[in-house]
Amino acid sequence: MIKKILIIFFYLSFLSIAAAEEIFLSLKKNKVNVRYGPSLESPIKYIYKKINLPIKQIDKKENFRRIIDHKKNSGWIHISQLKKINSVIPLKDKILFDKPSNFSKPLAKIKKGRVLIVQKCIEEWCKIKTKKFKGWIKNKDVWGQVN
């Protein structure tokens, strides 16, 4: 009986640690190396070339974070190349509105996959900006953390 309780305790502890590791971050630079392992000596798997791209941290080891992106690509990135999340990617085309309401003026059509900088979120809306536009989108069907 005690053995069963210990097994359950360790299993629950592992789940809470694993859940705590999953947080959203953004790329700090225009060129970020993603590696096969958590070391600068580890070979480069691929290179991101999109500043502010949102990614999800799924593990960490010393100064490296294991990440996954919205296309399910994964690898290791040095912590110096990451920053607190400030962006999202729409998973579907979105309408950008002047105000956080379906009845406000539509400003633009935002294509899925575009990186959007989040300024603030309230309820189901986020105020975002792009190079050309600033406005509100519904935060449903986006990749990245919205608060």
Image: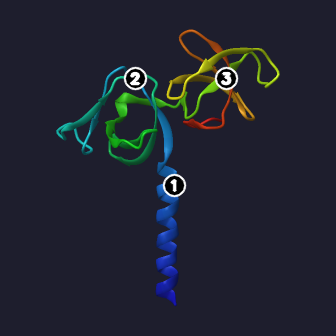
Give residue 42's position: percent from left, percent from top: 19, 41
**Residue found 50% across the figure and 63% down from its top:** 15
Name the residue type under label 3: Ile
Q: Quick one: label 2 or label 1, which is nearer the N terminus?
A: 1
**Residue found 64% across the figure and 13% down from its top:** 134
Q: Quick one: label 1 or label 3, which is nearer the N terminus?
A: 1
Label 3 residue SS: strand
Residue named by callout 3: 95
Q: Which mark is residue 50?
A: 2
In whole angstroms, how far apart are the C-alphas of marks 1 and 3? 32 Å
- In this view, 98 is above or below 62: above
Question: Based on the displayed image, in which of its 4 quarters is residue 91 positioned?
Answer: top right
Q: Do the CB atoms of the residues marked 1 and 3 lie less than 8 Å apart?
A: no
Residue named by callout 1: 19
Viewer-proximal residue among 13 and 120: 120
Name the residue type under label 1: Ala
